[in-house]
């Protein structure tokens, strides 16, 4: 809709495309394809804003993401007063989400000062009053803030989304990419807040990956959009992001059972993944830290050779030292948002939850999945309150995250758990049913078969 040329972050010229041609472009695309989501960027004139709104009324979409590109990083004004009026009066009331940075939020509200997180919350509420269904005020330029803090407001609740600030000059394009990623996630079926959280994680990863990239002589450089592609070439990293189907047969090791049967951690893990375990958690309460790290590294090689994620129970230090795929934490352990800050956006984080409230908090904290239970009584955890199948169902229905059932599950009752048929219940976590048996491989195969048969019945 406009061609802008930027050198050293200053706008040296803008070449506007005629609005009638913009209308033809929009008509060609929207009439020909079943477009689910539209994302806007720099809109150079009021007439183009009007053309866009007219096209979207003629060809409604499921979601409209508005990135109000108004001010360049160097402070150049890219949208005049008439465009601002068009945003306020026509475009924002149609938007499902608008994603201003603090400078743009200030301009939208008539140059309201923006110096604190409290100011960002106020701005999000005031912008929401202009008509969009959701608002994300981005605080990357917030002064004196050690973290990159964004405020998401859905008209009812505020969510403060924090991530470590990446020290790099390569930040050009982050706002556009964030909005584009949100649009892509919405098109894939994510909820609005989930789409925002995923997009924020992607930006953090890309910034960190390209922190030392040197392109051009300006004060700001581009960050690396090919992060995911390049990560697939790293032999030391898992090539796939977390997949909820990995929770299907979740094997949790136990140091006492390993001693009882005379097995090392590595031997137990190898037998489990050979038998069909789809994810492994090392729960080794009695191991010394050095021994635990060494064993985790060996287990990680085994799991990666089978394409199976390896998580560490509780011990984030061990997860970091061994480069495990993630951690699982309990309610009395480190909060999920702190674990996310320490581990970064690409690692897997699971949280034990007994109630819908805990499940909701895990989601807000940035967890990838929850483990819900104990479903049945178990000998592996003393004084562990059980929630039964009814409690598990309640948590599953309330959770926005995939769920794995935990606690006292084995061959005798695994089918009953899976046959609950709750869509986000993805599998069962087992300890004794695998590791307190003479042949781990056989027990794992048998349980995998039973789970698969149960899954077929509820399809």
Image (spheres, helix red, strand yellow):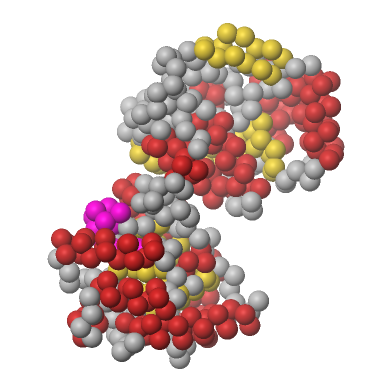
Q: Residue at x 80, y 19 (%)?
A: 19
Task: Decide whether residue 46 is among the magenta residues.
Answer: no
Residue 432 x %, y %:
33, 84
Q: Nearer the viewer, residue 28 or 305?
A: 305
Residue 163 vs residue 253: left or right? Answer: right
Q: Residue at x 74, y 24 (%)?
A: 49
Residue 336 x %, y %:
36, 55
Residue 32 vs residue 428: left or right? Answer: right
- Residue that sits furthest to the top in the current view: 12
Residue 13 vs residue 379: left or right? Answer: right
Q: Range of the magenta residues?
A: 310-323
Task: Decide whether residue 314 is among the magenta residues.
Answer: yes
User: Please, is residue 312 above or below residue 267 in the view?
Assistant: above
User: Please, is residue 256 above or below residue 29 in the view?
Assistant: below
Residue 322, picture quadrant: bottom left
Which image quarter holds the N terminus?
top right
Residue 313 seen by the camera: no
Q: Residue at x 39, y 41 (%)?
A: 163
Residue 57 x %, y %:
81, 36
Q: Nearer the viewer, residue 318 or 400?
A: 318
User: Please, is residue 104 above or below residue 11 in the view?
Assistant: below
Q: Residue at x 59, y 20 (%)?
A: 70
Residue 88 x %, y %:
67, 26
């Amino acid at each position: 809709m406009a061609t802008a040329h930027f050198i050293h972050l200053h706008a040296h010229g803008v070449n506007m495309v005629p609005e009638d041609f913009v209308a033809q472009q929009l008509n060609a695309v929207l009439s020909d394809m079943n477009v689910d989501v539209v994302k806007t960027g720099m809109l150079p004139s009021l007439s183009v804003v009007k053309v866009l709104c007219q096209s979207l009324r003629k060809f409604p979409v499921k979601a409209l993401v508005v990135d109000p590109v108004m001010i360049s990083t160097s402070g150049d004004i890219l949208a005049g007063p008439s465009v601002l009026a068009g945003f306020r009066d026509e475009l924002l009331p149609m938007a499902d989400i608008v994603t201003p940075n603090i400078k743009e939020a200030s301009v939208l509200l008539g140059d309201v000062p923006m110096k604190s997180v409290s100011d960002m919350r106020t701005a999000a509420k005031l912008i929401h009053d202009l008509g969009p269904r959701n608002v994300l005020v981005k605080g990357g330029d917030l002064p004196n803030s050690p973290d990159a803090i964004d405020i998401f407001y859905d008209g009812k609740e505020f969510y403060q989304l924090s991530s470590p600030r990446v020290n790099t000059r390569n930040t050009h394009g982050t706002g556009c990419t964030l909005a584009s990623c949100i649009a892509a996630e919405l098109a894939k079926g994510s909820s609005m807040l989930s789409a925002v959280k995923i997009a924020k994680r992607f930006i953090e990863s890309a910034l960190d990956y390209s922190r030392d990239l040197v392109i051009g002589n300006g004060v700001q450089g581009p960050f690396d959009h090919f992060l995911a592609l390049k990560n697939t070439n790293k032999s030391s990293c898992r090539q796939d992001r977390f997949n909820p189907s990995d929770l299907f047969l979740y094997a949790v090791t136990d140091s006492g059972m390993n001693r009882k049967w005379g097995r090392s951690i590595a031997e137990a893990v190898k037998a489990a993944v050979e038998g069909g375990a789809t994810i492994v958690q090392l729960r080794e309460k009695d191991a010394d830290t050095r021994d635990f790290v060494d064993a985790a590294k060996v287990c990680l090689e085994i799991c990666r050779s089978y394409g199976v994620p390896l998580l560490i129970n509780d011990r984030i230090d061990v997860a970091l030292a061994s480069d495990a795929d993630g951690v699982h934490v309990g309610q009395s352990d480190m909060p999920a948002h702190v674990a996310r800050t320490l581990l970064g956006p690409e690692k897997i984080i699971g949280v034990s939850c007994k109630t819908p409230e805990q499940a909701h908090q895990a989601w807000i904290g940035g967890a990838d999945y929850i483990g819900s239970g104990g479903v049945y009584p178990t000998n592996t955890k003393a004084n562990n309150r059980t929630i039964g199948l009814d409690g598990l169902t309640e948590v599953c229905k309330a959770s926005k995250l995939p769920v794995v059932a935990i606690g006292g599950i084995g061959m005798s009752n695994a089918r009953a758990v899976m046959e609950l048929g709750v869509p986000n219940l993805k599998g069962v976590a087992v300890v004794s049913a695998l590791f307190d048996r003479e042949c781990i491989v056989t027990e794992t195969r048998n349980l995998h078969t039973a789970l698969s048969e149960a899954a077929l019945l509820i399809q």
